[in-house]
Image (cartoon, rainbow, N blue to C red):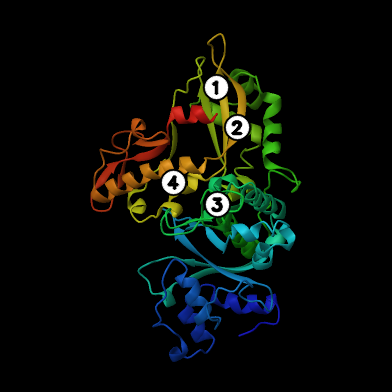
């Protein structure tokens, strides 16, 4: 099956919306016996393989050209899941093409790169994931073409060039998904040991990696395309209007006029309640521009950016550990590390907003900000805490989670509002709420 142009391809692909492959094929008068329902498909990409063969009548291959080379479009499928509140979210990052470290050094020009050749136009098929449902019955939710060069070009280019620079400097072993905003370099291989390969300009082995759209970014793409489908408008609530502006410089310039001011002075400036427990966070959000009208910004959603306020005492110590979202017991037992909720948070960009105790020991002032992402070695250290926690929850052990003294990066502790604030489990009744935390001493070392 070949297509004369992108519109022809998209018109055919959109017949899938709201249907399963089986239903769509019947609508297209494809006979049941011509559909290869019995073929064994395996791995995370099995639905993509299935849809390629059974709807587009294309054989799976590993060619370097886009899947629909006649119109220059790559095919990618992305699973969706429902949250507890009924909201639809993308389940995991979108893996693009494998990175060849050696070839990347001859592919530094972003516009002429193999990455652009392969991914500049992507036919995205979003479907509802359910591992208990046969592939031919999985429902497709949304189909559209994402034109990479028309969307977020400057930031994707910066992310790509950052990854190239790391490889060029013999630092491929130091690459982390958290280094970049939208375009990530995720690890490939069943185990860390099996994924180690040679890299140029260094004798040290590096993990095998692939380009990917980070989970936060592919989720924002989904939301954008849903909005466009409903209203034919794009999600244009952008913080930075000039797309060539560097995000970190922009944020630093927002905070610069307020450095050194006390919390009391800032509350008067921004009309914040100084008695609120979240007063520092409210000040930080107002400096950035969040308000009733702008409850979020495109950049923050697309890059999964988190704002964390930190209070530093006169002696330089930090009083509090840093908390994350509650652990959902029924979900974590089915997660794999690099698609887990905790991993997604750790590979975010963080804006640390640091308030320091005043010299007279009265209150705090805004001291500085630090735009930070966790180094790969520390992500690996946090993974140890996640693995133990997942295994304990699977076994029904809810009173022996890793403590701050047992890991230099992270630990697990309660986060419920009270002892009666409980969460459901898989077969162990209601249990006290816990969450992952970053250790305060680790945070101190990073800021």
Q: Is residue 128 shown above or below 191?
A: below
**Residue neighbourhood size for the residue with mark 1, other residues' Cα within 10 Å, grouped as few (<14), some (14–19), many (≥20):** some
Circles 4 and 3: CB distance less than 8 Å? no
Mark 1–mark 4 distance (CA, rounded to whole Å)? 31 Å
Secondary-structure class at tag 2 = strand
Q: Which mark is residue 274?
A: 1
Task: Name the mark nearer the viewer: 1 or 2.
Answer: 2
Residue 129 appears in the rendering:
yes
Query: Which residue does the numbered mark 2 point to in the structure image?
Result: 370
Report, in whole angstroms, how far the alpha carbon at label 2 lies from the one at label 3.
Answer: 21 Å
Pointer 1 with pointer 4, Cβ within 8 A: no
Task: Please give the residue where the numbered disc 3 appears in the rendered image.
Answer: 216
Verify CB contact (< 8 Å) between mark 4 and mark 2: no
How many angstroms separate mark 1 from mark 2 (CA)?
Answer: 23 Å
The image shows residue 216 at horizontal and vertical percentages of: 55, 52
Q: Position of residue 231 (x, y in %)?
A: 65, 62
How many C-alpha atoms fall within 10 Å of the one at disc 2: few (<14), some, or many (≥20)?
some
Residue beneath label 4, please? 342
- Residue pictured at 51% horizontal, 23% vertical: 311
N-terminal-most mark, 2 or 3: 3
Query: Mark 2 or mark 4, which is nearer the start of the sequence?
Result: 4
Helix, strand or loop under label 4: helix
Q: Earlier in the sequence, mark 1 or mark 4?
A: 1
Q: Quadrant of the C terminus?
A: top right
**C-alpha distance separating marks 4 and 3:** 13 Å
């Amino acid at each position: 099956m070949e297509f004369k142009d992108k519109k022809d391809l998209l018109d055919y692909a959109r017949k899938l919306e709201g249907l399963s492959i089986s239903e769509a094929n019947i609508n297209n008068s494809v006979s049941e016996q011509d559909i290869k329902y019995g073929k064994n498909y395996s791995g995370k990409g099995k639905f993509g393989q299935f849809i390629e063969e059974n709807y587009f009548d294309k054989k799976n291959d590993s060619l370097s050209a886009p899947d629909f080379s006649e119109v220059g479009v790559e095919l990618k499928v992305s699973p969706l899941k429902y949250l507890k509140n009924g909201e639809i979210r993308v389940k995991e990052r979108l893996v693009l093409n494998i990175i060849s470290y050696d070839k990347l050094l001859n592919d530094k020009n972003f516009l002429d790169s193999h990455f652009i050749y392969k991914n500049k136009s992507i036919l995205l098929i979003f479907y509802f994931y359910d591992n208990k449902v046969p592939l031919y019955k999985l429902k497709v939710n949304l189909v559209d073409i994402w034109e990479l060069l028309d969307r977020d070009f400057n930031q994707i280019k910066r992310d790509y060039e950052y990854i190239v620079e790391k490889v060029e400097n013999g630092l491929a072993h130091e690459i982390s998904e958290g280094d970049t905003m939208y375009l990530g370099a995720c690890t490939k291989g069943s185990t860390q040991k099996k994924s180690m390969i040679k890299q140029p300009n260094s004798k040290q082995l590096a993990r095998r990696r692939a380009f990917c759209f980070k989970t936060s970014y592919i989720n924002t793409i989904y939301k954008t395309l849903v909005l466009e489908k409903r209203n034919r408008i794009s999600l244009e609530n952008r913080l930075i209007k000039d797309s060539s502006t560097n995000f970190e410089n922009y944020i630093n310039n927002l905070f610069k006029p307020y450095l050194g001011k006390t919390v009391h002075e800032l509350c008067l400036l921004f009309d914040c309640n100084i008695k609120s427990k979240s007063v520092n966070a409210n000040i930080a959000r107002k400096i950035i521009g969040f308000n009733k009208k702008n409850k979020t910004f495109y950049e923050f959603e697309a890059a999964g950016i988190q704002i964390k306020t930190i209070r530093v005492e006169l002696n330089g110590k930090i009083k509090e550990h840093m908390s994350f979202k509650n652990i959902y017991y029924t979900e974590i037992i089915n997660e794999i590390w690099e698609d887990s909720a905790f991993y997604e948070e750790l590979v975010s960009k963080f804006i640390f907003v640091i308030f320091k105790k005043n010299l007279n020991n009265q209150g705090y002032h805004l001291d500085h900000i630090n735009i930070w992402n966790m180094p790969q070695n520390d992500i690996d250290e946090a993974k140890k805490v996640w693995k133990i926690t997942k295994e304990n929850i699977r076994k029904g052990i809810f009173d022996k989670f890793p403590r701050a003294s047992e890991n230099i990066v992270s630990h697990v502790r309660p986060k419920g509002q009270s002892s009666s604030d409980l969460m459901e489990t898989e077969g162990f009744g209601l249990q006290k709420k816990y969450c992952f935390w970053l250790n305060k001493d680790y945070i101190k070392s990073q800021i």
